[in-house]
Image: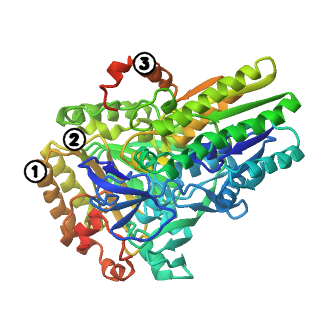
Amino acid sequence: MHANVTSFGRLGSADHEVLNAAPFTGGHNLLPRGLGSSYGDVCLNPGGTLLQTSALNNFLAFDPVTGLLTVEVGVTLGQIQSTFAPKGWMLSVTPGTQFVSVGGAIGNDVHGKNHHALGTFGDNLVSLRLLRSDGQLLNCSRDENEAMFRATIGGLGLTGLILDATIQLQPVAGAYLDTETIVFGNSKEFLDLSDSSEPDWQYIVSWIDCTSKHGRGLFMRGNNSADTRVPNVKVGGPTVPFTPPVSLINRASVKLFNEAYFNLNRMKAGVAKAHYQSYFYPLDAVQRWNLAYGPKGFYQYQMVIPRQGGKEALDEILATIRQSGQGSFLAVLKTFGQTRGPGMLSFARPGITLALDFTNYGDRTEALFQRLDRIVLAAGGTLNPSKDARMSREMFQLGFPGQIEFEAFRDPAMSSAMSRRLMGW
Amino acid sequence: MRILIAGATSGIAKECARIWAQSEGTELVLVARDTQKLAAMAADLRVRSPKVAIQSFSLNLVDPAEVADLETRLRALGELDVALIAQGELTDQGLAQSSAEALAKSLTVNATSVALFAELAARIMESQGHGSIALIGSVAGDRARRANYSYGAAKAFIDTYVRGMRHRFAESGIRVTVIKPGPTATPMTTALATSGKLASASQVAADIVSGISGGKSVVYTPGLWRYIMLVVRLIPQPIFDKLNF
């Protein structure tokens, strides 16, 4: 059947043929798709076919001694968390939304607030089974088909259809985290806090006020709590009911929101206890929040820049955004740990990462991105493909030299809007 | 509590099984055509709820002889508390109009097979004197329209069947429920689910499980469909004929 499909950023929609991923009978111009929560075009294949994995949603096996969980590829991270938290286990790595399939988490080699402690999703992936369009079924792990394993982690869905995967969960006492929120006044304070907190805190993330002069923000660190309670929490609160005619996220509302958010949280700073739902997935509480950016949609721009010279580049980036009058409520800052993501195309690497949402104002927004690109490139940084919808092919080649090795592991039948844009096919 | 689920591997039934499996002392009796899917479903339920007891029967759900044979095996298990009859397939209306074979298959799966299983459950529950039977109908059965009346007519058949059974068991301890889901995100509706917002199968399943335990006669899910269909049923036919949906 055909359907009009868009991605989370809602920058445009296009006609796709949509099929259930299983049974998989080959074909051409195919792309596996999970929940479509990627912001940009990594999950789109206009004019081609999407292999929808949502029906592949079985848990296959769990070992309560080792914490190894085998699941089909369409199982969502939210289902894993809510099923296993009461059993004393949670995901080792989770991104900031639980509306992500395991296949999407592997294909984008996602990271979370604990990269410095446990690495990326791929670092906690033990094995996977990959079905290629020629009918070959490959068992991939660090010991078997190791190169295909590295190609598929962060492989943007281009190496074939992942059927199932075995991941390492981490033991927890219950559903809570002990957290501490600390106000910082500028990027140096942020970096000092990061360095001093990393040894003792598994989760670290910061919100930064992208409208403020010096880059003030809130540094939030947390550890799994010894609290053993696992209350049932209903996921999802208010819904954005429809797409407003213009973006609600504009210069005035961003300034107001950031001022209010900073001051409210400054008063609440200090130690607290938080349920994992509100700590890991604060935005999941507002259903369809992506509609608030209006009919033209929005971009997420996530960069990573090396620590060497990173502070200066970060200050320049924040000043450029402030002067542009664009930018958003959602500016997220953190430092990656010392390891690179295990995939040939993994984004995570040592350095500072900043992610911001921008309303799509067309040329004005693209002009800002090009200014930011130059600063990121000059600093030796790159952008996150799983968020991207517009970086140049040159920028991708500079940031992801592994793509030369990756090319040989692509499945000839798999293609996406992003692969055609950044890799030529 | 022993629960029979026919058409167990369908998207909605599977989510119902996941909810029921969480309760202590649940024994699930899963019936479906595809042996592999049944095995995967049983493994999934055991990972989620290690204490759940599961029996699986793979058979052709439209074959009266196989259904009769299943009855013998079910009676050997003991009493049956709940039966959810969930088999069904989305019918391509155009195909149903052009192909006698496609139409016959659709009506056999969506109507005949459902009735065979409803009577099977009724016979067992009648002899034990209690139980709950739930059949999955659809909002599509509430008013026929040109886009899907072959499917809708089969679902209306289920609605009528439930009314009759409810009348038959009015003075007994047996409850009969018709479930009427709106469009739900399942493998049956993948393309639609990808482009828009359909109710999730787990949300619909939660409504079904609570509707059955509450002994409701009719469960619309999501609940809003009760009012939508009330309005749709009230539209006079001359006006309805001019509407394009």
Viewer-closest of A128 and B107? B107
Residue position for label 3: B231
When the figure is inspected, residue A336 is found, relative to residue A397, above or below; the finding is: above
Q: Estimate the x, y position of residue A230 in percent, counting from the top left.
A: 65, 40
**Residue underneath mark 2:** A211
- Residue situated in front as seen by the camera: B208 or B64: B64
Q: Residue furthest front?
A: B100
Chain letter for mark 1, please.
A
Q: Nearer the viewer, mark 1 or mark 3?
A: 3
For the residues labelled 1 and 3, the Cα–Cα distance comes to 47 Å
Q: Left or right of B44: which side holds B76?
A: right
Q: Is residue A174 positioned above or below A337 on the image?
A: above
Query: Which residue lies under the disc numbered 1?
Result: A363
Front label number (3 vs 2): 3
Q: Residues within 10 Å of mark 2 (few under 14, many from 20)?
A: many
Give the residue at x 72% y 49%.
Answer: B30
Is residue A244 at least partly visible in the picture? yes
How many numbered marks are there? 3
Q: Amino acid at mark 2?
A: Thr
